[in-house]
Image (cartoon, rainbow, N blue to C red):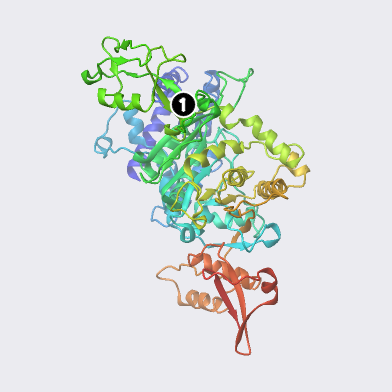
């Protein structure tokens, strides 16, 4: 601490000099220069000033206000009554509670926390003084931010939660393989690791954009589950709630990165080797997201930065330049990913309107010349009707050799105009053209929809005002599904049992489920979805709350119900085709909750025998009395690596014979699948 104390002494001396130097002229000059440097580096224009007394701080508040620096400076006076100092101190305590940095002296610890929050060596270097400590630092390429170490520790912390069934909110509970999970997505991702490791084909997420408005996430790394349970009303708490991130927070980007990093890490594990992830983001965090994804997925696995035209008209009252787009960042799990071609459009097929009636199909005329030159392509082509010879223009050549051209002429693949007297052209047959079109990085609203269309879609489905403020159009996600997933008809080796799994762990109003169900109907696929959504409360003055939806999760579940009902109604009375695959139009609702089993607490190596004995006695009765047999079963199955969608059959042993329970027999009269799970009761 001696060095840090010396540094603080220097800052105090500097503060005294500033006070005496023409009322802080030196400070204003230094701030101006510092802000110019940060602007050149593209950094956020913020500064931190430490003061030794409230008197100095009061003076600085007036001085900075006079020079229009209000809001750009964070002032620490080092006292326990200063809110910013308190925040840094509490974060430092939480981070160092298992180290020897905490001295027991609140004053010393307070100083240590404030000192640690500033990189003094870097600060000195930016002011022109390069110390030996700074010069000897090892330079490396990468991205770092405050809290990243904590995020890494959180990744290694196993979940102590479980997923509890909710039959009454589900559709086709016993047969569906679609999931809607209500809960904190980080805990859920951890719980799904064994069941879905390497099994998800495509992930789409639309995380909070970090625009300066509120967004929700657990604000205590070490208590993610407990914080969630209190937030969701599943555990008594002392008013704890999820955190917000506003533009005036000292660590605006840091908090967003700390939220995203562990979630993306666990999400990558779930992807198949040929899997891909699409992430919606705006300009606020797109650069940070790219760097984080480079670290997690690998820079070599970057696929594209798609620009989506989210508006069809500019905003006349926008400050600066009207923003018309969002980004969709795309990363593959490995080079095993193969993008799928998009269906050809009617506009692309329109030129193919000629048909000779010879069974070769529709064709259009095309140029016989090529840009690259080869002497083998220079020769005359004779018009069979007029006898006139045609040579390629000087410097160019025909696209085929003389021998190949003879074959084309014999097969009637060369066109000489409508009356047969013109120059030669190539017949380009539609059935020989690539069956699809290559996706691009520009997605216009005409092709994939826009924000207003998304609101109208939701309004039509709910037959009222849209209950969700920022939905994405299902056509946008449909495009992602088209280029990343396949159906059995497209892949001969793929059976209906090999359906692609789609994951969305920021599911919002459940647009992803809507898109999956709609596309399955269109192309006969049987894709499965897993949606995860936090039960974020709807504001009491919102349309959703007025309509009876208490949380965002409630809106998502209701949307899926309505989409299933709509699709079933559209197909009512239609005859099924011969090779028709019965589609999965159901979903199983699961809710994150604390484990049904008491958790063993990690005691210190030198823990007193009394504490060990107490814990042993507490685990004699280690099962939650409120847990049902089904709750216990599913927790064990998930922890053992079984999917929560496995078929479960209940059998009873009576008089030495096995038989189904009556309720089970009524639900399913067919012979149980061998892949199912059998539970025996005697």
Residue situated in front as seen by the camera: 494 or 251: 494
Residue situated in front as seen by the camera: 46 or 328: 328
Classify residue 635 as left or right of residue 16.
Answer: right
The crowding category of the residue bearing disc 1, from other C-alpha atoms within 10 Å (few below 14, some 14 to 19, many at least 20), is many
Query: Where 677 falls versus 575 (above or below)?
Result: below
- Image quadrant in which the C terminus is located: bottom right
The single residue placed furthest to the left in the displayed view is 375
Circle 1 is placed at which residue position? 363
Instruction: Say what secondary structure mark 1 lies in.
Output: strand
Residue situated in front as seen by the camera: 317 or 363: 363
The single residue placed furthest to the bottom in the displayed view is 655
Would residue 528 be seen by someone viewing this image from the given angle? Answer: yes
Residue at 50% from the left image edge and 70% from the top image edge: 600
Q: Position of residue 323 (x, y in %)?
A: 56, 23
Classify residue 667 as left or right of residue 495.
Answer: right
Query: Where 108 falls versus 348 (above or below)?
Result: below
- Determine which quarter of the picture holds residue 438: top left
- Determine which quarter of the picture holds residue 475: top right
Residue at 61% from the left image edge and 55% from the top image edge: 582
Q: Position of residue 246 (x, y in %)?
A: 57, 35
Classify residue 1 as left or right of residue 169.
Answer: left
Residue situated in front as seen by the camera: 471 or 604: 471
Would residue 144 be seen by someone viewing this image from the given angle? Answer: no
Query: Where 597 falls versus 107 (above or below)?
Result: below
Q: Position of residue 641 (x, y in %)?
A: 48, 64
Q: Position of residue 194 (x, y in %)?
A: 46, 61
Query: Where 482 falls versus 307 (above or below)?
Result: below
Q: How many marks?
A: 1
């Amino acid at each position: 601490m001696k060095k840090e104390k010396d540094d603080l002494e220097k800052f105090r001396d500097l503060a005294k000099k500033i006070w005496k130097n023409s009322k802080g002229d030196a400070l204003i000059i230094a701030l101006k220069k510092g802000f110019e440097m940060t602007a050149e580096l593209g950094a956020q224009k913020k500064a931190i000033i430490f003061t030794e007394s409230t008197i100095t701080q009061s003076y600085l508040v007036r001085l900075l206000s006079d020079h229009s620096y209000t809001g750009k400076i964070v002032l620490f006076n080092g006292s326990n009554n200063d809110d910013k100092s308190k925040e840094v101190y509490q974060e430092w305590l939480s981070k160092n509670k298992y180290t020897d940095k905490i001295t027991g002296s609140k004053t010393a610890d307070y100083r240590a926390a404030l000192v640690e929050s500033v990189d003094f060596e870097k600060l000195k270097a930016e002011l022109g003084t390069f110390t030996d400590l700074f010069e000897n630092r090892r330079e490396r390429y990468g991205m770092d931010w405050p809290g990243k170490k904590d995020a890494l520790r959180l990744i290694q912390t196993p979940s102590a939660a479980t997923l509890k069934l909710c039959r009454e909110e589900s559709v086709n509970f016993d047969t569906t393989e679609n999931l809607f999970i209500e809960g904190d997505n980080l805990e859920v991702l951890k719980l799904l690791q064994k069941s879905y490791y390497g099994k998800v084909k495509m992930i789409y997420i639309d995380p909070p954009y970090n625009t300066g408005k509120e967004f929700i996430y657990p604000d205590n790394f070490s208590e993610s589950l407990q914080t969630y349970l209190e937030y969701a009303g599943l555990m008594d708490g002392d008013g704890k709630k999820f955190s917000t991130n506003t533009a005036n927070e000292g660590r605006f980007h840091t908090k967003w990165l700390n939220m995203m990093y562990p979630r993306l890490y666990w999400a990558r594990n779930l992807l198949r080797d040929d899997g891909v992830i699409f992430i919606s983001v705006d300009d606020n965090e797109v650069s940070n997201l790219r760097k984080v994804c480079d670290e997690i997925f690998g820079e070599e696995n970057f696929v594209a930065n798609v620009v989506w035209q989210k508006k069809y008209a500019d905003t006349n009252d926008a400050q600066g330049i009207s923003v018309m787009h969002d980004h969709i960042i795309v990363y593959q799990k490995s080079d095993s990913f193969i993008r799928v071609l998009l269906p050809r459009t009617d506009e692309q097929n329109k030129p193919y309107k000629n048909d000779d009636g010879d069974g070769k199909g529709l064709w259009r005329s095309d140029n016989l010349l090529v840009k690259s030159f080869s002497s083998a392509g220079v020769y005359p082509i004779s018009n069979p009707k007029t006898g006139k010879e045609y040579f390629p223009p000087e410097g160019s050549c025909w696209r085929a050799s003389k021998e190949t051209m003879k074959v084309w002429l014999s097969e009637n693949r060369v066109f000489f105009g409508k009356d047969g007297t013109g120059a030669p052209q190539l017949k380009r047959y539609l059935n020989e053209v690539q069956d699809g079109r290559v996706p691009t990085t520009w997605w216009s609203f005409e092709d994939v929809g826009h924000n207003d269309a998304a609101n109208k879609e939701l309004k039509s489905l709910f037959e009222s005002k849209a209950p969700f403020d920022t939905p994405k159009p299902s056509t946008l996600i449909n495009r992602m599904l088209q280029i990343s997933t396949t159906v059995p008809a497209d892949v001969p080796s793929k059976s209906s049992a090999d359906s692609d799994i789609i994951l969305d762990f920021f599911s919002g109003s459940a647009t992803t489920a809507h898109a999956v169900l709609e596309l399955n109907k269109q192309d006969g696929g049987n894709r499965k979805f897993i949606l995860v959504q936090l039960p974020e409360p709807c504001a009491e003055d919102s349309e959703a709350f007025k309509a009876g939806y208490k949380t965002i999760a409630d809106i998502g579940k209701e949307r899926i119900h309505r989409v299933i009902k709509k699709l079933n109604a559209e197909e009512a009375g239609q005859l099924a085709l011969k090779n028709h695959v019965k589609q999965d139009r159901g979903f199983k609702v699961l809710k994150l909750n604390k484990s049904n089993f008491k958790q063993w607490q990690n005691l210190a190596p030198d823990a007193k025998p009394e504490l060990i004995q107490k814990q042993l006695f507490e685990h004699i009765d280690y099962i939650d009395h409120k847990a049902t047999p089904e709750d216990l079963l599913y927790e064990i199955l998930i922890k053992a690596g079984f999917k929560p969608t496995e078929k479960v059959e209940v059998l009873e042993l009576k008089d030495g014979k096995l038989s189904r329970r009556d309720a089970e027999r009524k639900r399913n009269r067919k012979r149980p699948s061998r892949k199912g799970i059998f539970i025996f009761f005697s």
